[in-house]
Image (cartoon, helix red, strand yellow):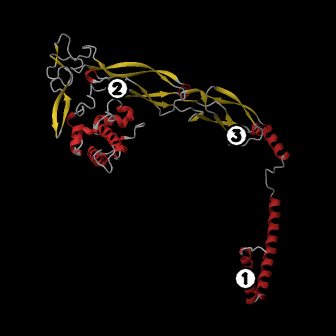
Amino acid sequence: MSEKRDYYEVIGVAKGATQEEIKKAFKKKARLLHPDVKESGDEQAFKELAEAYEVLSDPQKRASYDRYGHEGVKGAARSFDDFDFSNFSGFGIDELIEALFGGGMRGGFGGFGRQAGPPQGAHQRYDLELDFLEAVFGCEKKIEVNRLDDCTTCLGTGAAPGSTVSTCQTCGGMGQVKELVNMLFVQTYQISVCPHCRGNGKKIDKPCRDCRGDGLTRKRKSYDLKVPAGIADGSRMRVAGFGDKGQHGGAFGDLYVQIHVKPHKEMVRDGVTIHVKQPVSFSMAALGGEVLVPTVEGSKILKIPAGIQSGAQLVMRDQGVPYLNVPNKRGDQIVHIAITTPTKLSKEEKEIYKRLAELSGEQLTIDTEDLENDGDENKGADSKAESKKKAHHQNGKKKTDNDDDKDDSSLLDKIVDAFRPKTSE
């Protein structure tokens, strides 16, 4: 499978489903996809279903998957792509679930599959806050995490200094015990953690006091993280092997760095585009000119065309955010023009604005005489309209019913003629 689907989608349950609901949905779907079913059997889909169930049926793996997705269970979940299901043809669904996932089994049928080694350590999360420009151009940050690592006192053995350490006789130092189980017509090995050494493979007479025999303690570890240019708020970076170390020599988990970018007081980022608001005076808007506009590289000159209107947008090419992992390609900056109205004017400025209004023929006040004359003219117009209305009403009374019928008939004929199909002569 080229791209893994969401495990909840594969099984057909919601993310908040209970373990019982997950098992019930898996069994229902497994009955349809089982390779033995001729009508609906699909071995590839059944393998995908088995992989999804192995993760979601394990509380720890499910929690890691819910938090980090497929990356969170990478290496911790079995892949059934190379699994040969022909070895258990005829198995019932309940028997198949028990064989694949029950009893702590992590081996396979007749040697198929693989035996699980020491468990990988837990993943960790680190929240990193960046300034606006640090996210735009990238930076290097020193981060520190408190992770599980080999105990300094016992060097990861779990034994106190001078204590005798011997190989576990039960598991032979493997940390696991294997038992042959007969299931119908197939023999399979059931593998589980050794009960005597608890998976350590060694027997310790006196456990280490600092780690209490676990071999692991919390330690501060620093790391120089290179943040790429163009990283966005909410992005997540993965640092492989920087999480907790697994028990019994297990591999380190991963560290996931969550990026939080502080907002800028003048700029707003939208992907690789930056938006800024630029105030422009009346004089500048009318005559045009040049202004200094803030950009991520400092203030730069922008030409304002004459007659520009408030709300207009000017584009500054290649002054935006670099494309992630393509530092030579950048977005644009959009400048939003806002024409400002002066709130306080000097006496001289007022005279200039009045003179400008006179030159443009603009009337700043309304003459009351003009308003009264306009009212008289409106009254005269109203009287004339009323007289016309009365005359029309009187003329209308002289019409007979036949005249009304003719008018209606004539109007109807015009409508019919207008929509009648035209025939060729």
Instruction: Return the x and y of residue 356 as percentages of the image width and height.
Output: 82, 43
Whether residue 410 is visible to the viewer of this picture, yes or no, is yes
> Which element type, helix, strand or loop, lies under badge 3?
loop
Q: Reading the chain from its start, which is encountered first: label 1 or label 3? A: 3
Judging depth in this view, the residue of 356 and 308 nearest the camera is 308
Q: Which mark is in front, 2 or 3?
A: 2
Q: CA distance from mark 2 to mark 3?
A: 57 Å
Q: Tag 1: Cα neighbours inside 10 Å, few (<14), some, or many (≥20)?
A: few
Numbered mark located on residue 408 in the image: 1
CA gap between label 2 and label 1 equals: 90 Å
In depth, the one of 399 and 291 nearer the eye is: 399
Q: Is residue 15 visible?
A: no
Q: Nearer the viewer, mark 1 or mark 3?
A: 1
Identify the residue shown where x is 81% and y is 51%: 363
SS category of the residue bearing label 1: helix
Q: Describe the element under mark 2 as helix, strand or loop.
A: loop
Q: Amino acid at mark 2?
A: Gly
Q: Are marks 1 and 3 in contact (CB under 8 Å)?
A: no
Task: Indicate the amino acid at tag 1.
Answer: Asp
Give residue 234's position: percent from left, percent from top. 47, 34
Give residue 409's quadrant in the image. bottom right
Q: Quadrant of residue 326?
A: top right
Residue at 25% over, 13% down: 153
Quadrant containing the N terminus is top left
Residue 47, percent across and down?
Answer: 32, 39
Q: Earlier in the sequence, mark 2 or mark 3?
A: 2
In the picture of the structure, the residue carrying the numbered disc 3 is 340
Query: Residue 253 shows which numbered tag?
Result: 2
Badge 3 density bin: few <14, some 14–19, many ≥20, Cα 10 Å: few
* Quadrant of image for the C terminus: bottom right
